[in-house]
Image: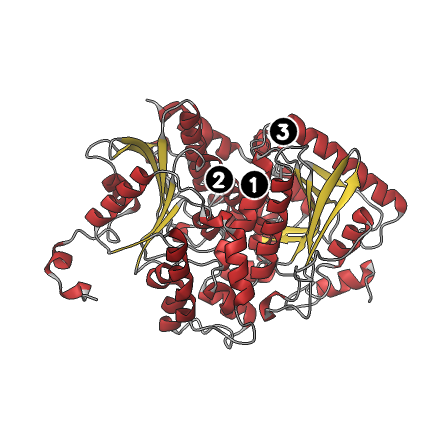
Amino acid sequence: MESGRAAFLEESKQEGKPMNKFTGIRGRIWFKALTGQASSMPGDPHSVLTADAPIGEDKARFLCVVPDPDGRFPCARRGEVGLEEAYTLAARVREAIHADKESTKRPIIAIVDVKSQAYGRREETAGIHLAAAAAADAYASARFAGHPVIALIFGQAISGGFLTHGYQANRLLAFDDDGVLIHAMHKEAAARITRRTVAQLDKLAETVTPLSYNVRDYAKLGLLYKLLHVSDPEDPNAEDVSLVRHEVIAAIQDARKTSPDLINRIESEAARVARKASRLVRARLAEQWNH
Amino acid sequence: MRDPILTREYLKRRSFIELSARDRAKCLFDSGTGRELAGPFDRIESPWLAMQDVTPEADDGCIVMRGTIGGQQAVVIAFAGAFQGGAIGEVSGAKLTAALDLARADNEKGIRTNAVLLLETGGVRLQEANLGLAAVAEIISSIIALRRHAPVISLTAGTVGCFGGMSLAAGVSSYVVMTRQGRLGLNGPEVIEEESGVEEFDASDRSLIWSIFGGQQRYDQGLVDALVDDDADQIVKTVRDLIAQGVPPVHRSEQVDLYRSRITALEDSRQWNPEELHSWKNQNKKENQ
């Protein structure tokens, strides 16, 4: 398997649907680096990796969605989050909530490298919206139950895929790297739907920060807890792994200290600038609520 | 089944779909109690649309109203499908999240406050991309935090439907109400056709669309709690009844093992006739007996 950075970036430059082939490679690599394992739990589809592994003083539950070319459903074989992936994530997160009811709430770590939700007729017929909701519900319920939920955005985090797997975390960490893509839609499709060329979209994104596909611009929105710098996201050395572990431990500690809701995403220093309108809405509604 | 078009009551009914988002919200409240918050005169517009030469609206296509429903405190949040397809931007998303959070705070103080979401939305507003997606994540979280205290009712009457990330908001709600004109799904037909090809989904096939996403189908497969006519009085009564029912013992999106086993049981080698999934609803009934 060719997993080098050069190949990844070369693929990403190609026209059509970029980076399909390489989505999930980072997920698998980092899952293995952080847990020493790389397999699914018994009975689970091969597209969802789950492992309990030590990190700092804790034993955390790690989850990752990876491509499975032999998966049951054709529209969810390339790293998309489909019906099976969403319900498996939900089941494995709820299993941890249930097991820790009377004990220390283990951290739940979502390693995120998902190209999107699955776009298929079977998926819609069987109600993939409920599957996705069940996974988001499980992550949010874990957070409200006191589990530190950490999302490590190491590759793509697109749209419904990200809402299903990762976006309910108390703390979001991402690599400062061109291979990280956090967005509501892939660039070509977004340009088409908003009736623009990709060049126009890129130009607009220079001033309209939420449109940007660059993770540094995403960081300006105030949603991220931290940007991480590693030497090679696709081929991490011991130092890279140690740095990530260190940052995850810090994020777990930080999450345990604060309220379990997502208010930090609007209270951060960057959010005070970028999300002024959100803050104004909250203030105005609070003023008028009882008057 | 009666043909609704030919019955006298249906002809005399007050259409809900034909109402604006503001009037839809207002008609749910006990007479004269609905009061709009952060309304158009507060002029909190999207800061991002004008930068892209798109005309903003003074309410950002989202109406928040407080009042009483059946004598209980309630907040109704309505999306205007007529503005940007009801899509979630920074401001409209923040309105919904803030309203849910204020309702939760009241519940925590012992003031039972219910929420009704009128979801006519295509999902994230692409002109505000990452802030829209972030808003949807926060909306989901705030619904889950509120529904422990009081029911959160999602209603999709039509004609825009409820798609994209906001279908997850419906998914985590306490109750989902639809009309036959409403549609509910994660990916709309055009998106599937574009991403996976016309052989996967022919977006010009209207009967296919309604057979999968339509309110009747979603009700028949047990993913919706109440199917209503396009009749404002019937909808008001349904919402009141659900508020009176209170928080369900278990929410649909918490029933992971049940729905996961249903997916496992499906044959994966072919497309399914949507009617095959009607057995899910019959199983729900048996379990509730």
Q: Is residue A194 visible?
A: no
Q: Indicate the position of residue B47 as horizontal and vertical percent values.
A: 48, 39
Judging by the rendered image, the residue that carries numbered circle 1 is A140
User: As displayed, is residue A108 above or below residue B32?
Assistant: below
* Subunit bearing disc 3: A
Q: Residues within 10 Å of mark 1 (few under 14, many from 20)?
A: many
Q: Secondary structure at mark 2?
A: helix
Crowd rating for badge 2 (residues with CA inside 10 Å; few <14, some 14–19, many 20+): many
- The residue drawn where x is 10% and y is 60% is B8
Residue B200, horizontal then vertical, whole percent = 51, 74
Which numbered circle lies on residue B47? none
The mark lying in front, picked from 1 and 3, is 1
Q: Nearer the viewer, mark 3 or mark 2?
A: 2
Horizontally, residue B253 falls left or right of residue B210, namely right
The residue under the point 69% across, 29% down is A254
| Image position of B229 with respect to B271: above or below | above
Can residue B27 be seen here? The reply is: yes
Q: Position of residue B106 (x, y in %)?
A: 40, 26
Viewer-side residue, A209 vs B206: B206
Q: To which residue does mark 2 refer?
A: B144
Chain letter for the residue marked with disc 1 in the picture: A
Residue beneath label 3, please?
A: A269
Instruction: Please report the residue visible at 41 percent of the width from the left and 65 percent of the height from the top.
Output: B279
Question: Residue A244, relative to residue A269: is it above or below?
Answer: below
Residues at marks 2 and 1 on the same chain: no
Tell me the quarter of the picture where residue B260 sits.
bottom right
Name the kind of residue labelled 2 in the image. Answer: Ile
For the N terminus of chain B, the quadrant is bottom left
Element type where label 1 sits in the image: helix
